[in-house]
Amino acid sequence: MGPPIFLMLKPLSMKPTKFLFEISQEDSGRFRLEGELSFVSVLAAMKKTAGYFASPVDKMVFDLAGITKADSAGLALLLEWLRLAGQSGIDLHYVNLPGQLLAMAHVAGVDDILIID
């Protein structure tokens, strides 16, 4: 008879799960985004930022220098953030957009809608 099965199994890895999307405040109204803006992360990104547009600021800046991957869902999220900011009277600017987001915005014809510094 062989060894019990539980002795033959390798232990599960205890590595921390890599984040898909993170946002942190650098200054008043300025935020740094990191990770992905993609189909797998936009829901989490929307949840993390939902309350941001209720803040009493006139201008917000989202710095996307830390975005490593983006797709059309990420572009849609940028447009949704712009809509939410407009409803709250906030002037939303994007800086350091990755080339792939700029290209998608241009192809979709929305690059003139996004305020890109």
Image (cartoon, rainbow, N blue to C red):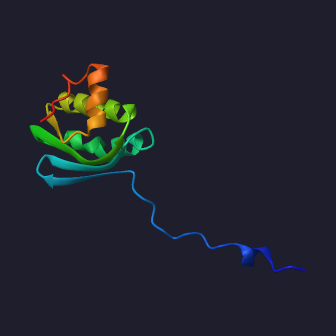
Q: Residue at x 39, y 45 (%)?
A: 44
Task: Judge left or right: residue 38 versus residue 87.
Answer: right
Q: Position of residue 65 (x, y in %)?
A: 22, 47
Q: Where is residue 88 in the image (x, y as percent from the top left)?
A: 18, 32
Task: Judge left or right: residue 33 versus residue 17.
Answer: left
- Residue projecting furthest to the top: 109
Q: In which quarter of the image is the C terminus?
A: top left
Q: Which residue is drawn at 18% across and 22% down?
A: 112
Q: Can residue 23 be seen in this view?
A: yes
Q: Position of residue 95 (x, y in %)?
A: 16, 40
The quarter of the picture where residue 71 lies is: top left
Instruction: Classify 74 as above or below 66.
Output: above
Q: Can residue 79 be seen in this view?
A: no
Q: In which quarter of the image is the N terminus?
A: bottom right
Q: Which residue is drawn at 38% across and 31% down?
A: 72
Task: Judge left or right: residue 79 versus residue 7.
Answer: left
Q: Position of residue 54 (x, y in %)?
A: 21, 40
